[in-house]
Every structure is written in C-alpha cells, then in structure tokens.
Image (tube, helix red, strand yellow):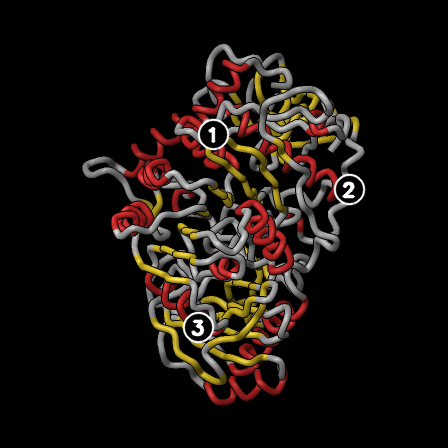
Amino acid sequence: MNGISLAQGMNIYEERSEYTLSNTNRSGRGKNRRNSATSQGQGNASASRQPSKSSRPSTRQQGKEVRPQGASLSAVRSKGREREFAPIEGLPVSKNEETVIDIIGMNHDGEGVGHANGYTLFVQGALPGETVRVRVMKTKKQYGYAKLLEIVKASPDRVSAPCPIYDQCGGCQIQHMSYAGQLAWKRQLVVDNLQRIGKLNVLVEDTEGAEQQGIRVLPTMGMDEPWRYRNKAQVPIGVTEGGLVGGFYAKGSHRIIDMETCLIQHEHNDEVVAKVKEIGSHLGISAYNEETGRGLLRHVVVKKAFRTGEMMLVLVTNGRDIPYKDEWIGSIREAIPHVASICQNVNKKQTNVIFGDETRVLWGRDVIYDYIGDVQFAISARSFYQVNPVQTEVLYGKTVEYAGLSGKETVIDAYCGIGTISLFLAQHADQVYGVEIVPEAIEDARSNAMLNEMKNVKFEVGASEDVIPRWKEQGIEADVIVVDPPRKGCDPRLLDTILEMKPERVVYVSCNPSTLARDLRVLEDGGYRTVEVTPVDMFPHTVHVESVAMLVRS
C-alpha cells in the first residue's frame, strides 16, 4: 500500500470515510502524476459549488448559532474551542509545525498523501512523486491535514492550471495535473478500491502472457478535448453595488464570487448567464438573500443540447411574481436568439436545494431536444440528463458491449432514470424493462420511448428490489440485468434479487469506485465472476470517475 501497512491503511479508512491511496507508479506511468463546481446529484459539476449541510458547523443553523437546552452560549463556545484546539498527545508532528515530506499517492478527494515520521498527512494541491514543504494545520489520531508551502521537487505531471480562479473555486480539484496523469490516476483509484474494499484479484499490467485469474481493468477512456464539456450550468445569484453577480460559492462558505467564464462549461452557457445578469441588473431585478429570505432571483440554470444546438434558460425565483417580466423575456430573446425555452421555477424554501416544486413556461417550449447516439431525448427544466453528452455516448456504448446482446435477450435496467440506458439497450435487445423510484423520471422515460417509437421497452415506478421480484412472479426472466445506482451503491435487497434471478450477465455502471467494489464482492460471493472493468472519464479535471463492470455467472 505504498508505505502504509494494510492494517494502518484500514484503520485510517475506517476513521476517515472512503480513504483511498492511489499511486500512479503502479499504473505504469512512473512516479509521476472534485462536479466542477458542484451540481445536483451525482458528482457532476456546474458553475456553482454548494457546501452540503453536513459540512457546516453543527452549532450553526440557518445563520443563527444554536445551543443545547440549558447551556449558556459562552459555555458552548468554550467547550467547542476546547475540542477543536486540544492537542493530541504523542503524535510525531504538532499543529503549525513545518516539515518536508514525500508525496506517495493521492486520495479520493485529490489530496496528496505523505508521511511525517510515519504519520499520514493529506496535502491539498500536492501530486504523487513530489517532495513538498508543508505546515501542519490540523491533527487527528491517525492522520492530519497540512498546507502546501513549497514544491521542493515537482512531479512531471504537474501543469499550470489554465483557469484563472482555480484556487478560489474548488470545483475542479485536479487541473494542476496533466490530463494523461489524471486518466492514469483514475484507473488506479478504481484498481485500489477493487483490491482494498472488494478484496478482488486484479490482473497486473506487466504480466502479460502469464496464466492469471483476475479482473482486467482497462485504461480510463478519456476525451480528445477535455474542456468545455458540460451541457448544464447552475449558477447562484447575488448582488453587489454594481448589480447582479453569479458564479460560485467561495470555499467553505455561501459567499458568491462573480465569474465570467468556466472552462469546463460550454461557451454558450457562460454567454447566457452573463446576459441574464446584465439584463437583470439593468431592470433592477433583486437577488435572493439567504440570511433574510428576501430578494427574487436565486439561481440561473442553463441547459445546452450539443447535437441540436437548442438551449433552455430556467430562472429560479423566490416567488411567482416577476417584475418587468415581459421586458426581461423580450430582452433575453433579443440578446440570445438560440434560446428555445425560457422557464421559471419557484422555490420559496430556505434550503440548499436549487429547484422548488413549481415550474412554468414563460416563453417557448417546455422541453428542448438532444441526441445521444441515435436516440433522441426531450429535456425538461427539472429532468436529469447526463452533463457530458460526448462521454455519455462512450459510457453507454461500453454498457451495450458488456451486455453482449444479440437481439433475442430480455434485459432489466434497474435505476433506469429517464430511460437513457434502457433506450440504448432496446436497440439491441428483444425486450427491456426499466424501473425507477422517481415518478417524474418514469414519465420522462415513457415520453422518450414514444419519441423514438420504441415499443419493446416497458417502464414502471418503484424500488427495484420491490418491482423486479414482482416481475419474476409474472414470469419475466432476465438474461441481462443492468444497474446504474447512485453513489451509495445498490440496495442490498436488489443484490439479493439479482442473485435469485440468476441472469447470465450483470452490467454494473458506477459513479463511486468504493461502493462498486463492495457490491462486486457480494455478487462474486453469490456466484458471479467480474471479467472486466472500464473506467470512463465523465468529468475531466475533477476527482470523479465512472466505471462499467461486466460480470458473468460462474
């Protein structure tokens, strides 16, 4: 484990959720080597970055300090400071100490990992293979955090981040690493999780020709042009003396930093956001204030269809009434002629969630249309659609390949969403059944099936672990089951259902290598063999990696 004993590594893992050490050395690249600003859902990035509620101090809620009943405010603060600053005895390093360490790997957050006298330190901005001088900022029993002060010896994979606000934003975590280095690290991240969490045997790259049993992990499938790939921007709006601002949240806060361009967003998304801010400022539109709950405009959401060129603009407002609505819409249409849909979403709640329950069309259609491969999709204001359409086609192509379809099979797509994978599979299968717990997603899936005149697809609302056994009772036997779960992985009951149905193949599409490894272990123990895993880089310059795994019945 690159200088960490297995026992030490597992102890650290248990204390710090999903601790991962990945050294590109083992990927054949030598010693060298987070959703760009975060979007809703799966790790996929937008032009804003929202800290989760769990990341905020527990003594604060909605901007007000709270305390246990009967405790004085000063007592709470004092006790909190004692906990925060109380030194831990017997550590080889102390807070504010400066030291020089070698970076031997990188964890799942993109932080460099090194040791000071055997004590693990995580260093933001450091790359594997580097020697760095750091200042210890925070210590825990088995690991600590340090600030990068100086690069004594740089990695050959170190590059200058092209984004001028890279250090402030925090949305892209690894722009300072070459793209080839990113791809190699992401493959190794998958390998490490399969071996450490799944206890699975992975074939070693440099033993070609030798008789081996194990999983082939292919090189990460990257992009020819890993910039400007996002088709959706979600930008929080604030106000300054000069008018409306919109961009991203400063690290660890809800202070909005204005931004004119994001290098992983499609250029048209940047243009639309800039125009909306300009027109809104001219008309005197107010921005929402989180602390007071007043102000109108909360977020600007822009969706771009890469193939058709159509665009949708969604104004998320704190109330239904929009002053100067006609002037605003007219100015937007005049300034941005390629916008095919202007919608309003009403969200009056004091929450981090971007969308409210009510959406209405202000002008144009309620959907825009785009293609992934030969399949057409209708995209509404709130429907989920993969944010990197180029790599989505790569991901789904690999899924179809691993399904091994001849046109005669029955396929079940668990976690089918709006039917994107289901419709891809339906082009090559006899019958496809999709199940999803979100009713609105199933409505979109059925509409998309009708749009493509695909009659060999059936969608049903419900939890996969409830619906699929019911299908089995009705005589539906699956030759292939495809799963594409959220980051938490498959529900254990779904895994049991798969083992009971005994399909010839299982294709697992994953956005989280650790839960992928955990679930593959369960399926392997139940009689399946993982043949091959392909990492796919859906989100260049962030730490996220998708994977597709092919399993066959032993």
Q: Position of residue 512 (x, y in %)?
A: 50, 40
Q: Position of residue 29 (x, y in %)?
A: 76, 30
Foreground residue among 432 and 310:
432
Tally of numbered tags: 3
> Residue 354: image x %, image y %?
42, 61
Question: Going 70% across and 20% down the picture, which residue do you hit?
Answer: 210
Identity of the residue furthest to the front in this view: 408
In screen coordinates, is 458 left or right of 188?
left
How far apart marks 3 and 2 lie (CA) works out to 48 Å
Amino acid, disc 2: Val
- Taking the spot 36% from the left edge, 48% from the top edge, the residue there is 477
Number of the front mark, 3 or 2: 3
Residue that badge 2 annotates = 159
Q: Mark 1 or mark 3: which is in front?
A: 1
Give the alpha-carbon distance from disc 2 to disc 1, as whole Å: 45 Å
Q: Is residue 488 above or below residue 520?
A: below
User: In this figure, which residue is indicated by the disc labeled 3?
Assistant: 450
User: Element type at marker 3?
Assistant: helix
Per the image, the residue denoted by label 1 is: 554
Please say if the residues under marks 3 and 2 sit with CB atoms less than 8 Å apart: no
Res. 57 visible in picture: yes
> Which element type, helix, strand or loop, lies under badge 2?
loop
The residue that appears at 37% across and 81% down in the rendered structure is: 321
The answer to whether residue 288 is visible is no
Disc 2 or disc 1, which is closer to the eye? 1
- Give, as a three-letter code, the residue at label 1: Ser
Above or below 226: residue 69 = above
Indicate the quadrant containing the N terminus: top left, top right, bottom left or bottom right. top right
Residue drawn at 63 percent across, 15 percent down: 3
